[in-house]
Image (tube, rainbow, N blue to C red):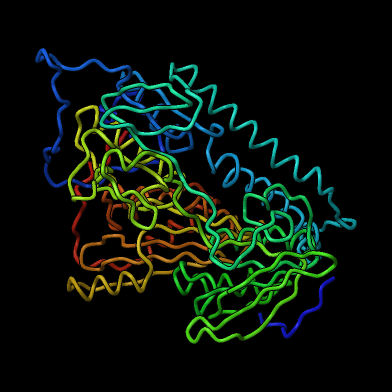
Amino acid sequence: MARRSCLGRSDCAASGEKPSDSNLRMRLFVLSRRPKPRRVNKVSASLSSNGSPPKFDYDLIIIGAGVGGHGAALHAVEKGLKTAIIEGDVVGGTCVNRGCVPSKALLAVSGRMRELQNEHHMKAFGLQVAAAGYDRQAVADHANNLASKIRSNLTNSMKALGVDILTGVGTILGPQKVKYGTDNVITAKDIIIATGSVPSVPKGIEVDGKTVITSDHALKLEFVPDWIAIVGSGYIGLEFSDVYTALGSEVTFVEALDQLMPGFDPEIGKLAQRVLINPRKIDFHTGVFASKITPAKDGRPVTIELVDAKTKELKDTLEVDAALIATGRAPHTKGLGLENINVETQRGFIPVDEHMRVIDAKGKLVPHLYCIGDANGKMMLAHAASAQGISVVEQVSGKDHVLNHLSIPAACFTHPEISMVGLTEPQAREKAEKEGFEVSVAKTSFKANTKALAENEGEGLAKLIYRPDNGEILGVHIFGLHAADLIHEASNAIAYGNRIQDIKFAVHAHPTLSEVLDELFKSAKVKGNISSGVGEAVAV
């Protein structure tokens, strides 16, 4: 095993039907609150030479068959649009093949391993368990098999609904015209770009796919190193630290900012560090960049040069068995033919307006062209991409629709989980100072929840950030058992403009973890009795 150079342990990543229609689907998208209808600034297709509307091969072409493209395609068929989806790699995109799906398989394993290895936890149930072990290849096969199954499900769902799946790299030749493969040219009234993203690797880091890896490689679980450095402590880094430590690795985080988990609400991040970092075989360096990483070779370990994030002076050199680069993701937008429509990317991202309509280099809308998901950079989450795609389909079907991104939840699937929606407390207070309103915070502990205690999982916190003058929910953050499942009551409330004074009359089954949110909303103190205008309950 590689030796540490200078490292001490610390005390220690949408349907035009009305809501009452029986066939309205539940989807991972949200409607923005609209005080009054607005007119969409639609751009009509140009007329043909004889003055009649042009004929297209398709109503809608989607470039990219990831979760965003898939969600858009299914909704387009539901709206009666003749739809084709182009994929140059494999159906499912990053999420299904190299992201959220296989990683959840690995995390399912790590969760069980962690529980079986916790002797005190098992004894509390009166259980005696022999030493837990694992088969690395069987674990890797579980992740790969799950990805294959979900990929097949997505492919079959589109074929069954009549979506044409076209194989090849999609390139925009001009307005409403796309080439795929070598020389196949097709046209559509509207086009959606949904090409997703790839792992982002900073300069100075040499990735060999074996000892210096990205999440794409790590999900294959080709080996479990004794000691691995994880560069970046966001969602990706945190989840992989959960996997690796459960399987026996020691982990060192390298974080450029001054604190771990910088994207989380500070209070939740502090608690998460106490539970997810400090008790485990994890140490960390903050405020430093990994300026150079060299893969292991000829018996030498992976070497990582750390420089001060502010002064850029060399601070330390680490020697480890492997390094995982978890510094985020970059948009996959090269080779799309954007130059043919005068579109210039911004740091690789395709500029769009609130309707996901693409904006060209002169600041004008490109007719009938949209971009969703990671490629536009608004919110790099698979379900956000799907929600954006559904929103676009609503628009091309003639209905005004704007997605409220503040109502889209996010989750980190560690053990315990972290979830969030809306603003963090610092963001909320900054907004309040600018707009002149008051902010209040309510909290509830999992230690007061019967179901959590029955599971011997009382470690957790739910936090509500709100306006006490009108009961508006600004943000909700949860750390604890099944936090990723609990957050949707809050995200849906934000999406539909429900106020705390309405939600606190909702009934939750007992005993369930959902009562954590029930108690959270009931504990909030709202001045006056302003209602959001939701319909009154009917006694039956």
Please state which of residues 320 and 266 is positioned toward the viewer in this rendering: 320
Q: Establish if 353 lies above or below 367.
A: below
Q: Residue at x 25, y 68 (%)?
A: 468
Q: Quadrant of the N terminus?
A: bottom right
Please state which of residues 446 and 381 is positioned toward the viewer in this rendering: 381
Q: Establish if 126 lies above or below 34.
A: below
Residue 395 percent across, percent down from the top left: 23, 33
Residue 492 percent across, percent down from the top left: 36, 47
Please state which of residues 58 and 68 is positioned toward the viewer in this rendering: 58
Q: Establish if 334 lies above or below 241.
A: above
Q: Residue at x 72, y 66 (%)?
A: 228
Q: Quadrant of the C terminus?
A: top left
Query: Would you identify the image quadrant in which residue 75 lies?
Result: top left
Query: Would you identify the image quadrant in which residue 206 lies?
Result: bottom right
Left/right of residue 23 with respect to residue 258 in the rendered view = left
Q: Residue at x 48, y 37 (%)?
A: 66
Q: Establish if 376 lies above or below 325.
A: above
Residue 299 percent across, percent down from the top left: 85, 67
